[in-house]
Image: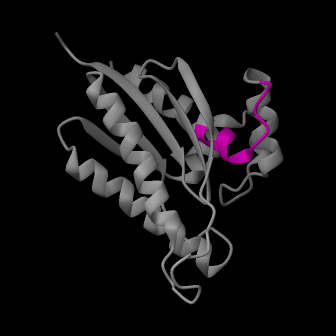
């Protein structure tokens, strides 16, 4: 029996948007997972950051749960670039991105990883090309408004971006088959 195929899209950040569904574009679950920094109880001067551990643990649990149910997983993320405000945000974004790549490497046979430039996501999702600026930037509200046309309960721009990425990639998968 061939394994089932699922698609998971991630808008990586302190508030990570996610969308999970079938590879043919049926969205089953979406939301936002927040990774907040907690003070160390052992040493208040410690530079350790629990967000890396928390992100990796959440992602690994999600991936292993899919694999344990016989599901091959395609993970698609926005291509990493230094677009986040502040040094801490950029470092965290690249760190989380590296963890996704590590998990893909660990489960190489069952996970396929793709990266999509932000501009491609915005241009696909926003039918009014005027809303997408020259460099591919689009306002967070424009992305959320478009998402709410299909999913009225979505209010967070990270979840909206993950849903847009999910639909963009599921459309690409359909075109390949």
Q: Residue at x 41, y 20 (%)?
A: 174
Q: Is residue 100 left or right of residue 130?
A: left
Residue 7 location, x and y as percent?
Answer: 42, 30
Q: In which quadrant will I find the C terminus?
A: top left
Q: Is residue 155 magenta?
A: yes
Seen as rendered, the residue at the extreme top is 1
Q: Residue at x 82, y 35 (%)?
A: 145
Q: Is residue 115 left or right of residue 3?
A: right
Q: Is residue 108 left or right of residue 49?
A: left
41 w.r.t. 151: above or below: below
Give the extent of the magenta segment: 152-162
Q: Residue at x 51, y 86 (%)?
A: 46
Q: Is residue 79 visible?
A: no
74 w.r.t. 130: above or below: above
In front of the other: 105 or 139: 105
Residue 67 location, x and y as percent?
Answer: 28, 30
The answer to which image quadrant residue 110 occupies is top left
Q: How is the image coloured?
A: one colour
67 w.r.t. 114: above or below: above
Residue 143 location, x and y as percent?
Answer: 75, 41
In front of the other: 67 or 130: 67
């Amino acid at each position: 029996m061939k394994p089932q195929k699922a698609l998971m899209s991630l808008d990586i950040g302190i508030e990570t948007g996610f969308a999970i569904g079938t590879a043919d574009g049926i969205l089953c679950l979406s939301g936002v997972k927040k990774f907040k920094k907690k003070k160390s109880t052992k040493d208040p001067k410690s530079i350790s950051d629990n967000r890396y551990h928390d992100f990796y643990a959440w992602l690994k649990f999600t991936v292993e749960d899919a694999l344990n149910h016989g599901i091959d997983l395609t993970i698609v993320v926005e291509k990493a670039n230094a677009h986040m405000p502040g040094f801490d945000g950029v470092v965290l974004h690249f760190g989380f991105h590296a963890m996704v790549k590590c998990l893909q490497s660990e489960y190489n046979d069952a996970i396929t990883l793709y990266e999509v430039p932000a501009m491609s996501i915005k241009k696909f999702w926003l039918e009014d090309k005027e809303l997408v600026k020259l460099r591919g930037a689009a306002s967070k509200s424009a992305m959320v408004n478009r998402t709410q046309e299909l999913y009225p309960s979505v209010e967070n721009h990270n979840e909206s971006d993950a849903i847009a990425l999910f639909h963009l990639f599921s459309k690409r998968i359909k075109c390949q088959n």
